[in-house]
Image (cartoon, rainbow, N blue to C red):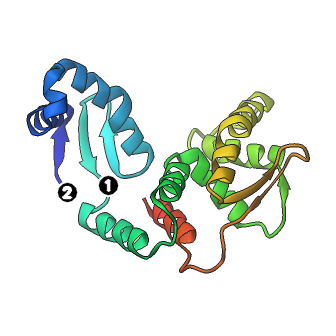
């Protein structure tokens, strides 16, 4: 896998897409650096070093494309439903929520998910989880992640009861399960 500078990516994009040619290379580079490359990095598709502004593929694009093609080809979902599934698993925090729920056979409280998620996020920093950490995470997942995951059909979320449960079938031939598995390997 090769490493490429963000400036080289901006030049390639600008020269290959007529719509992007109307803007400046500098604005395209800013968009890449602050928006697009971090999203791809969070999804586990690339490794992006913000200091050197260099990106390296984290997965073989041919393998990823083949997996995605297989999922889409055999899916009974329409394009909008497939987009919702891919959007739902694009964020690492939502993938953590799905992993946490996959380990449980019953509904659990949003607070439990929040504490577990904040612990996983803090493990990398080797520090204890404070009440503020999990409460901040609870606010984020309650207002953003859980509704998105529920709309994608990946979880059952009852905001009134403050409970959440996985809706991903055990059947690994199900496209939702395949997309979640694919995102977990990224």
User: x, y (%) of residue 105?
Assistant: 80, 70
In the rendered structure, the answer to whether residue 158 lies left or right of residue 51 reads right
Q: Tell me which residue sits at (75%, 43%) in the image.
A: 114
- Quarter of image, res 73: bottom left
**29 relative to 101, above or below:** above
Residue drawn at (78%, 52%) of the image: 157
Considering every residue shown, the one lying at the far right of the view is 161
Across and down, in percent, residue 131 comes to 80, 31
Q: Residue at x 66, y 68 (%)?
A: 168
Badge 1 marks a residue whose secondary structure is: loop
Q: Residue furthest left?
A: 15
Residue beneath label 1, please?
58
Quadrant of the rendered image containing residue 145? top right
Which residue has dot 2 on it?
A: 1
Q: CA distance from mark 1 to mark 2?
A: 8 Å
1 and 2 marks in contact (CB < 8 Å):
yes
User: How far across and how far down the image is residue 70, in percent?
Assistant: 37, 74
Q: Quadrant of residue 65?
A: bottom left
Judging depth in this view, the residue of 165 and 120 nearest the camera is 165
Q: Quadrant of the N terminus?
A: bottom left
| 54 to the left or right of 109 | left
Q: How many numbered circles are shown?
A: 2
Badge 1 crowding class, 10 Å Cα cut-off, few under 14, some 14 to 19, many 20 or more, is some
Q: Does 184 sit above or below residue 162? A: below
């Amino acid at each position: 896998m090769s490493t490429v500078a963000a400036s080289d990516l901006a030049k390639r994009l600008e020269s290959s897409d007529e719509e992007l040619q109307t803007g400046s290379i500098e604005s395209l580079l800013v968009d890449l650096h602050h928006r697009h490359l971090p999203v791809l990095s969070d999804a586990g598709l690339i490794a992006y070093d913000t200091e050197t502004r260099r990106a390296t593929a984290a997965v073989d694009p041919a393998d990823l494309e083949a997996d995605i093609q297989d999922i889409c080809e055999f899916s009974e979902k329409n394009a909008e439903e497939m987009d919702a599934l891919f959007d739902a698993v694009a964020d690492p925090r939502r993938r953590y929520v799905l992993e946490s729920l996959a380990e449980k056979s019953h509904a659990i409280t949003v607070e439990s998910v929040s504490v577990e998620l904040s612990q996983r996020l803090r493990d990398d920093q080797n520090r204890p989880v404070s009440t503020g950490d999990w409460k901040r995470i609870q606010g984020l997942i309650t207002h953003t992640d859980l509704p998105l995951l529920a709309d994608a059909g990946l979880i059952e979320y009852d905001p009134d009861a403050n409970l959440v449960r996985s809706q991903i079938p055990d059947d690994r031939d199900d496209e939702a399960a395949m997309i979640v598995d694919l995102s977990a390997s990224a």
